[in-house]
Image (spheres, coloured by chain):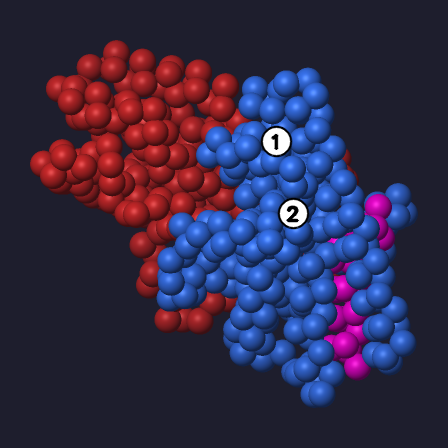
């Protein structure tokens, strides 16, 4: 896969995002939700839990940028009749698509900065990242896994009657089961095995622990879990995408379904 | 042209709109309601993380009510769909008021809001074992309907604004929902915020209706409950009138400067 194709795809996505407000709207709305969580935490006299609000803002923005925009990219390509040209190219569609998703997912990191600013200037909370290296490494793993996993949703949405129905449904269960805002230990035990299959679950705990003075434990196994889930998601996503595009191409319904 | 006739025609389009997203009730339950209930449960569990069952029940009532206005808020986006379908100029040049047609098309989301809130209430009450004060709780559906109707009027007003800039429809809807959740007593009491915010939320939907709902569940006397419901109704009617006036004003402005299809 020539690097040039990936760079061109990434640059194109940046240009599209600059012009299309729909592409970046999670950046404007999701971090605002930390206003709600921080208000609940401060009102309840538990400012020590503020890190939960910040990590939730970060993970939900990253998740929303990848899962939301992944399906949007495909829908936009289909609407603009680019999809037919893209799949006719000798380059596998999954590669430039992954590069475009990665650009948007990386932008989701801004969700943390926005929530941090809100905590600092609206509620006067000073939140320290005690283990910045662990935090940064976890963030990189999370973004890469998010972009890779988003290929699955892209592929699945590709064949459905309407992407919106499933796209809108995914966020609630995903963030609840992954413990993005509240730890999974508060859920019934029956859900815990499912949580372990979501990369955000491993990221959430590690990110929160990196914001506490105590040294986080089991760092490498948890980073490995994020990486494995990301790789598995990426592999499954690109396989599904190829199968589904082949199917659409074979039946001649690429632009109609 | 009578209001009812135009409204009915618009409503039949609205029914098709909702069927684009959920073409049967099973899909509605397994996608839309699943998302709404799990999102609400996430906020409620924050109360459990804090370690207070009072916070859990406070967040439960707040979230079960606000999901109605959140669902009814789809009015904002649906107000702009005629722009994308190319039917907006035809509605504007027709002799009937644009607001009648818009109210017809968008009112399906009010029904969706009421059903969403009621179903969410039932599920969350069962999940978190909220004690139900009978017979007071029997009036809860009435308050839910009034809060959703009030939010509908507000959303129609927002829709009339974003109809000129349709690409902002989703942002406007989401912002309105988040601000309601933050400031209107859903997550923390209104008194937590500065006085100037309290003054603004006094004329916003949800605030008074939610207050009535909390009084109802806390076994409050009937007078403050009725007063809060009346305040919610007044706020809702005011936003509805503003929305209707604004909808036609925006259409006339677009017609006057020829920008109906270009903005």
Mark before the other along the chain sequence, 2 or 1: 2
The reply to whether callout 2 and callout 1 are in contact (CB within 8 Å) is no
Which residue is pictured at 14% across the width and 35% down the height? A252
Return the residue at label 2. B1
Magenta-drawn segment = B200-219
Identify the residue position indicated by label 1 in the image.
Answer: B93
Q: Is B203 colored magenta in this rendering?
A: yes
The circle on residue A2 is: none
The answer to which quarter of the image holds residue B235 is bottom right
Query: Residue A225 or B248: which is nearer the viewer?
Result: B248
Name the tint of chain B in the rendering: blue
Horizontal and vertical percent for residue B67?
60, 59
- Tell me the shade of chain A: red
Quadrant (top left/top right/bottom left/bottom right) for the C terminus of chain B = top right
B41 shown above or below A70: below
In this orientation, does residue A158 appear?
Answer: yes
Left or right of B258? Residue A171 is left
Tell me the SS state at disc 1: helix
């Amino acid at each position: 896969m020539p690097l040039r194709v990936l760079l061109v795809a990434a640059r194109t996505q940046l240009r599209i995002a600059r012009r299309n407000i729909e592409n970046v709207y999670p950046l404007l709305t999701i971090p605002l939700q930390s206003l709600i969580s921080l208000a609940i935490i401060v009102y309840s006299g538990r400012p020590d839990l503020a890190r939960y609000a910040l990590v939730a803002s970060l993970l939900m923005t990253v998740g929303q940028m990848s899962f939301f925009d992944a399906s949007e990219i495909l829908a936009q390509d289909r609407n603009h009749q680019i999809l037919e040209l893209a799949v006719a190219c000798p380059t596998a569609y999954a590669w430039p698509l992954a590069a475009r998703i990665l650009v948007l997912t990386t932008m989701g990191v801004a969700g943390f900065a926005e929530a941090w600013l809100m905590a600092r200037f609206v509620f006067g909370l000073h939140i320290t990242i005690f283990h910045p290296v662990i935090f940064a490494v976890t963030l990189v793993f999370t973004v890469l896994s998010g972009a890779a996993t988003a290929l699955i949703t892209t592929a699945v949405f590709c064949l459905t009657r309407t992407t919106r129905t499933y796209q809108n449904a995914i966020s609630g269960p995903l963030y609840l089961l992954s413990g993005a805002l509240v730890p999974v230990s508060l859920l019934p035990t029956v859900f815990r095995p499912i949580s372990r299959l979501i990369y955000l679950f491993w990221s959430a705990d590690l990110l929160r622990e990196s914001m506490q003075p105590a040294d986080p434990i089991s760092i490498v196994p948890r980073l490995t879990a994020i990486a494995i889930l990301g790789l598995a998601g990426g592999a499954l996503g690109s396989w599904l995408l190829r199968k589904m595009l082949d199917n659409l191409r074979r039946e001649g319904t690429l632009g109609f379904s | 042209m009578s209001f009812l006739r135009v409204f009915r025609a618009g409503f039949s389009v609205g029914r098709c709109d909702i069927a684009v997203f959920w073409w049967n009730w099973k899909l509605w339950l397994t996608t839309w309601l699943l998302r709404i209930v799990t999102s609400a449960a996430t906020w409620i569990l924050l109360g459990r993380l804090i370690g207070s069952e009072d916070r859990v029940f406070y967040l439960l009532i707040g979230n079960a009510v606000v999901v109605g206005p959140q669902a009814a808020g789809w009015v904002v986006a649906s107000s702009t769909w005629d722009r994308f379908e190319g039917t907006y100029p035809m509605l504007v040049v027709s002799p009937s008021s644009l607001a009648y047609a818009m109210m017809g098309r968008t009112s399906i989301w009010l029904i969706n809001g009421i059903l969403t809130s009621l179903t969410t209430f039932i599920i969350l009450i069962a999940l978190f074992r909220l004690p139900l004060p009978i017979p007071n709780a029997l009036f809860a559906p009435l308050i839910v309907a009034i809060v959703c109707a009030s939010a509908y009027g507000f959303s129609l007003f927002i829709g009339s604004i974003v109809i000129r800039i349709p690409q902002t429809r989703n942002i406007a809807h989401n912002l309105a929902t988040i601000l309601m959740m933050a400031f209107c007593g859903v997550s923390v009491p209104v008194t937590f915020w500065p006085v100037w915010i309290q003054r603004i939320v006094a004329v916003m939907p949800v605030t008074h209706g939610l207050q009535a709902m909390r009084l109802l569940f806390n076994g409050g006397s009937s007078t403050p409950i009725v007063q809060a419901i009346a305040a919610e109704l007044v706020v809702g009617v005011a936003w509805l009138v503003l929305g209707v006036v604004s909808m036609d004003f925006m259409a006339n402005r677009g017609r006057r400067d020829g920008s109906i299809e270009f903005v």
